[in-house]
Amino acid sequence: MTDATPSIFRRDLLAGKIALVTGGGTGIGYGISSCLAAAGADVIISSRKPEHLAPAEKSLREHGGRVKAIEGNVRDPESVGRLMEHSVQEFGRIDILVNNAAGNFYAPSASLSPNGWKAVVETDLYGTFYCSQAVYPIMKAQGGGRIVSISMTLHYRGWPLMAHATAAKAGVDALTRTLAVEWAGDGVTVNAIAPGPIPTEGVKKAFTPPNQDAPDVFRMEEHAKRAIPLGRWGTPEDIGQMVTYLASPAGDWITGSIFVVDGGSWLAGGRD
């Protein structure tokens, strides 16, 4: 595993921009929030779990910009509406929306409960739509904006035990392309990023031997060398850098695209 990917972006690249990151307090969401803040953006992080927000808010403020944590549930359209309203009241605008909030777990399709299916699809797909729909009139009124949604690669070839997540993320990809065409005339770009293997808490747990508290780092490194052509796990910052690029002036003519950032892992599926 490597240290956080160093940034190539100027610290004032996104100065004056307001970014809202759902699920921005932990994992990939925090990495995205950190990269945007490091590039000069003021950042709003949101989560339905307030305990995830306070530590992240404090840490992000070390970049020097304004940071605001706002509790919100992307599965609830009314909560999403309040999130957007509160964000505009606090900062006056929203230039960048990152649809990162997600839920997932392994489950055999034959025994996946209706509630389990609903929870993941509502978070991953409905939440992406609710937030995009709610931010659109704000961005339209201010002359444009950037929407970036976090997808995945597992639905590219089918993946056992992940019917709920792959169906939802395939929907996110389709939604990304549709909204990109529909909203382009209003200056709103819509793209998605499909991350590869990143050692989240769930991944670390899978590599933790019985009766131990920490993952087997050697096994994790060996897995990365076998399964990922570039030979290492990804970092949240790898995804954050791509979001920063799309949110910058360099992304002005990019819309409707899904960017795979995975070290080549999905192309090499079956090597492990």
Image: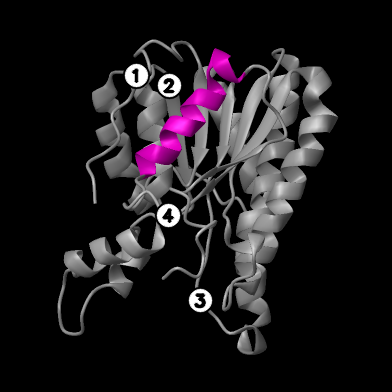
Q: Residues at badges 2 and 1 in contact (C-beta under 8 Å)?
A: yes
- Residue, disc 4: 49
Above or below for 103 versus 20? below
At label 1, the amino acid type is Gly
Tag 3 and tag 4, C-beta contact below 8 Å: no
**Disc 4 residue type (three-letter):** Lys
Which residue is more in the foreground, 205 or 58? 205
Residue holding disc 1 = 65
Residues at marks 3 and 2 touching, judged by CB atoms closer than 8 Å: no
- Helix, strand or loop for disc 2: strand
Q: Amino acid at mark 2?
A: Asp
Q: Is residue 210 visible?
A: yes
Q: Residue 42 — which label?
A: 2
Q: Which colour style is shown?
A: one colour
**Residue 45 in picture, x, y percent from top left:** 44, 37
Q: Give SS at disc 4.
A: loop
Mark 1 surroundings within 10 Å by alpha-carbon count, few (fewer than 14), some (14 through 19), many (20 or more):
some
Residue 186 forms part of the magenta stretch? no
- Whole-angstrom CA distance, mark 3 to mark 2, is 35 Å
Q: Is residue 174 left or right of residue 69?
A: right
Quarter of the image where one finds residue 43: top left
The span picked out in magenta is 236-251
